[in-house]
Amino acid sequence: MLVKYLISDVVPALRTSDTGIKALNWMEVFRVSHLPIVNNEQFLGMISDTDIYDLNMAEEPIGNHKLSLIRPFVKQDQHIYEVIEMVSSMKLSLIPVLNEDSKKYLGLITLHDLVSYFSSLSAVSQPGAIIVLELNQNDYSLSEIAQIIESNDTKILSLYLKPQENSTKLDVTIKINRTEFASVLQTFNRYNYTIKASYMKDEIMDNYYSDRFDSFMTYLNV
């Protein structure tokens, strides 16, 4: 999925002639903590609610103040995963989108847009269990994990990797296409994998697994 297919014009951009109070009102209405500043389709930077409060500029035009604006943006033909990385690392509530030569503001993508997009993916909407493995980064083998799962007549719907902070360990989160997954867990145990967690729908747990497991966590959408 490319960035240009998620561009939204619902959240308006500010102009330098807009006041701080107008910016704060829009942030409240659209439930964001940042807004882009754009004059004549030129992206000047982003302002946050903290910037406005710190400068005590609510009643004055934004352009009356010397601002140290952050200028994060993505281009329309970048992949959506690059948006996630930037939004996450910079703790943004939205990200501006520019054209390929970075000269024209096209719109923005909000954090809500990203969540909605990923919630619509088939891997999320399809029923299935989630398994979280913990292993050393050097021991990670996608082919072996896939072989273990597929040997139990099960398919991988999605797989995510997350390195643990200050550690050589890796969390591998796997969503599979089955809710009855005891045989998959047993096979991972047989291969000496550490199963950090497993999740499934509450109703499936109640009907089929209440006599096999001590407790379960609520099914997660990822």
Image: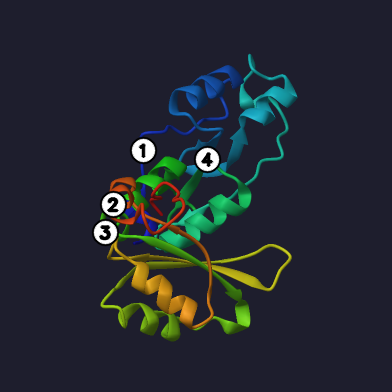
Marks 1/3: CA distance? 26 Å
Label 3 sits on residue: 122
Label 1 sits on residue: 9
Q: Earlier in the sequence, mark 4 or mark 2?
A: 4
Q: Pick out the residue farthest to the front.
A: 211
Question: On residue 204, which mark appears?
Answer: 2
Q: Is 198 left, or right, of 179 in this rendering?
A: right
Three-letter amino acid code at the position of disc 1? Asp
Callout 2 secondary element: helix
Three-letter amino acid code at the position of disc 2? Ile
Q: Earlier in the sequence, mark 3 or mark 2?
A: 3
Marks 1/4: CA distance? 15 Å
Q: Position of residue 76 (x, y in %)?
A: 40, 57
Q: Earlier in the sequence, mark 1 or mark 3?
A: 1
Q: Is residue 78 visible?
A: no
Residue at horizontal 45%, vertical 61%?
A: 81
Front-most of residues 147 and 9: 147
The answer to which quarter of the image holds residue 65 is top right
